[in-house]
């Protein structure tokens, strides 16, 4: 879960948050970002079999939560070589 205390996002703008290059009114006022962070995050979460959710109140902040499917794997030992050659340019 990720929560911020910024001014929040109006309900009418929440569906647009995940569209590339679109920003909320608050995002445009901050003059930061490109509008790609949330669309990229949503795609990564979808690739992992999950979904992202948004809850926001104007004047109070926004909360993003997501669920993904993950499985436990067995740990294995990885052997590495300490003989690394260095090239000079």
Image (cartoon, grey):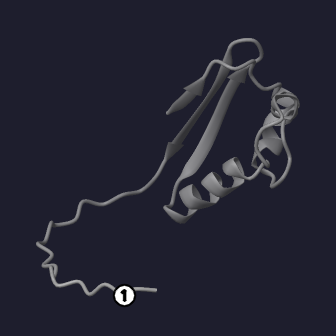
How would you rate the neighbour count of disc 1 (Cα within 10 Å): few for under 14, some for 14-19, many for 20 or more?
few
What residue lies at 31% left-to-right and 84% top-to-bottom? Answer: 86
| 11 shown above or below 72 | above
Q: Residue at x 79, y 36 (%)?
A: 14
Q: Residue at x 51, y 60 (%)?
A: 49
Left or right of 30? Residue 87 is left
Which residue of the protein is positioned furthest toward the front in this rendering?
88
Position of residue 23 measured from the top left corner of the image (x, y, whole percent): 84, 41
Nearest to the observer: residue 34 or residue 5: 34
- Per the image, label 1 sits on a secondary structure element best described as loop
Q: Is residue 10 above or below residue 13?
A: above
The answer to whether 69 appears left or right of 86 in the picture is right
Residue 21: give x, y in percent of width and height.
Answer: 84, 52
Tell me: 89 left or right of 86.
right
Q: Is residue 43 left or right of residue 13?
A: left
Q: Residue at x 30, y 60 (%)?
A: 71
User: Is 89 located above or below residue 4 in the figure?
Assistant: below
Which of 69/1 is in front? Answer: 1
Question: On the image, which quarter does residue 87 sit in?
Answer: bottom left
Measuring from the top left, give residue 41's x and y in whole percent.
61, 53
Residue behind mark 1: 87
> Where 62 falls versus 40 (above or below)?
above
* Total count of labels: 1
| Residue 75 point in image, percent of width and height | 15, 66
């Amino acid at each position: 879960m990720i929560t911020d205390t910024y001014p929040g996002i109006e309900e009418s703008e929440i569906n647009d948050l995940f569209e590339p290059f679109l920003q909320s009114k608050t995002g445009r006022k901050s003059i930061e970002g490109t509008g790609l962070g949330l669309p990229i995050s949503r795609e990564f979460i979808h690739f992992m079999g999950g979904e992202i959710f948004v809850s926001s109140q104007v004047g109070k902040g926004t909360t993003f939560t997501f669920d993904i499917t993950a499985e436990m794997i067995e740990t294995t030992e990885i052997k590495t070589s300490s003989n690394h050659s260095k090239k000079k340019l």
